[in-house]
Amino acid sequence: MHTTRAVCILPGLLGSLHTARVVCILPKLAYDPTMASAIRWGILSTGKISHDFVTAVRSLAPEENQKVTAVAARQLEKAQEFAKCHNIEKAYGSYPELIADGDIDVVYVGSVNPTHYELVKQLLEAGRAVLCEKPLCINVRQTQELVALARERDTFLMEAVWTRCFPSVRRMMEELKTGTIGEVKHIAATFGIYTPENNRVRTKATGGGTALDLGVYCAQLTNLVMDNQSWSRLRTLGHLNNEGCDLSLSTSVTYPGRELATLVTHCEVAMECAAVITGTKGIMKLLPPFHAPTELVLPSGTVSYPVPPSFPGAQYNFENSAGLQYEALHVAECLRKGLKESPLMSLYDTIRTAEMVEAMRKSAGVEYPEDDFHFDSSTPSFNQDCCM
């Protein structure tokens, strides 16, 4: 059986500076991949995140039986360059060509946010299994339509919230279920990165804004901890640029049981990017970066799950992207088991996350052309509670 190592750092007795390190051997997969057929990936778009995902897949052990076999871009030259870099057999100069390729088991969509809806729709209509980067769509309506289509076509669809696949997050949920910190009363998550003026996060045409790009991580974590419970109130304050993109947001969410979530996103400054869950018996903390965490602080000590190794010379654009291997392994397990959605990031999870993200940005006055609701001069304020 393949295994993953976890290093547990326990506080020393009576304030001692010494620490104890415990190595835990955990099962990596619940099935034997050598007994299953190969998983053949197709890649839509050749951006930075696609590069990282393909690098992660290429870093998997041979016995995991996964391979990227085709890539598509809007320009053939870009697809060919990407294919050469990653030793991919086929390169297409249009997305429809890859969608029509019958030698692909699942397609990874790594294009910019506004293109997700139409591309995933075409893939599902063609009966393709899909792993689409977050956010799955710009708004709730589009998200619900794709979820309905996936169920109608009986086709696998997963929003690529890779956070859910990290061992530290799965351990966090185990600890919550066993009552390690008692009843959860507060969730705090901050996600701030510095971006230059011309960055896509600040650009409306590329589906920019911190709610869609960063807030989705805060929202999914809150919904995960709160088990998708409906909130009582959600209020957001923030700063928008001239395009109407949110540069920073501060959101407070209250729940019927007097639970509170405090979520902050920012693209003008780098923040700690940590998540703290406080309960009646203690505190747990996902250390930075909480969206791709390798360390979980428990009342008993810190548990460390280093990202899996990559092939020699592998280079990534984003921190801890080697952890995308967890996501690729999870999708393969789902497909080999015949599942149509992920038990870690279900389609209902995706809808609930989309609802919270839309509530966050609309509460701050952020809208997109894809929205059904639009602000105008006669809209002095926006009450999200009345619009959900």
Image: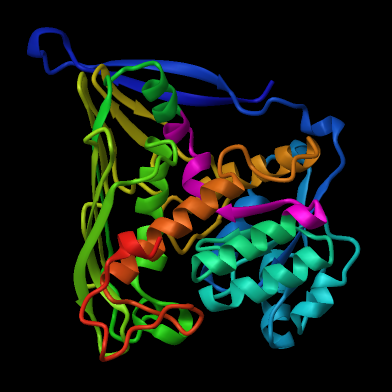
Q: Quadrant of residue 93?
A: bottom right
Q: Is residue 106 visible?
A: yes
- Outermost residue, left side: 15
Q: As displayed, is residue 103 above or below residue 96? A: above
How far across and down, in percent of the image, does residue 110 sit?
A: 59, 68
Q: Quadrant of the C terminus?
A: bottom left
Q: As displayed, is residue 62 above or below residue 179? A: below
Question: In this orientation, which residue lies closer to the viewer: 377 or 94?
Answer: 377
In the picture, measured across the screen, residue 172 lies left or right of residue 338, that is left
Range covered by the magenta-colored residues: 151-170
Q: Quadrant of the N terminus?
A: top right
Q: Is residue 107 visible?
A: no
How far across and down, in percent of the image, does residue 59 sit?
A: 63, 48
Question: In this orientation, which residue lies closer to the viewer: 254 or 111?
Answer: 254
- Outermost residue, top side: 13
How far across and down, in percent of the image, does residue 126 sit?
A: 84, 67
Q: Residue at x 39, y 61 (%)?
A: 357
Q: Residue at x 38, y 65 (%)?
A: 387
Q: As displayed, is residue 185 above or below residue 129? A: above
How far across and down, in percent of the image, does residue 107 sit?
A: 73, 61
In the picture, measured across the screen, residue 143 lies left or right of residue 60, that is left
Count of numbered tags:
0
Specify the color scheme: rainbow
Question: In this orientation, which residue lies closer to the viewer: 41 or 349?
Answer: 349
Q: As displayed, is residue 294 above or below residue 130? A: above
- Outermost residue, right side: 102
Q: Residue at x 52, y 18 (%)?
A: 25
In the picture, measured across the screen, residue 294 lies left or right of residue 253, that is right
Q: Is residue 166 magenta?
A: yes
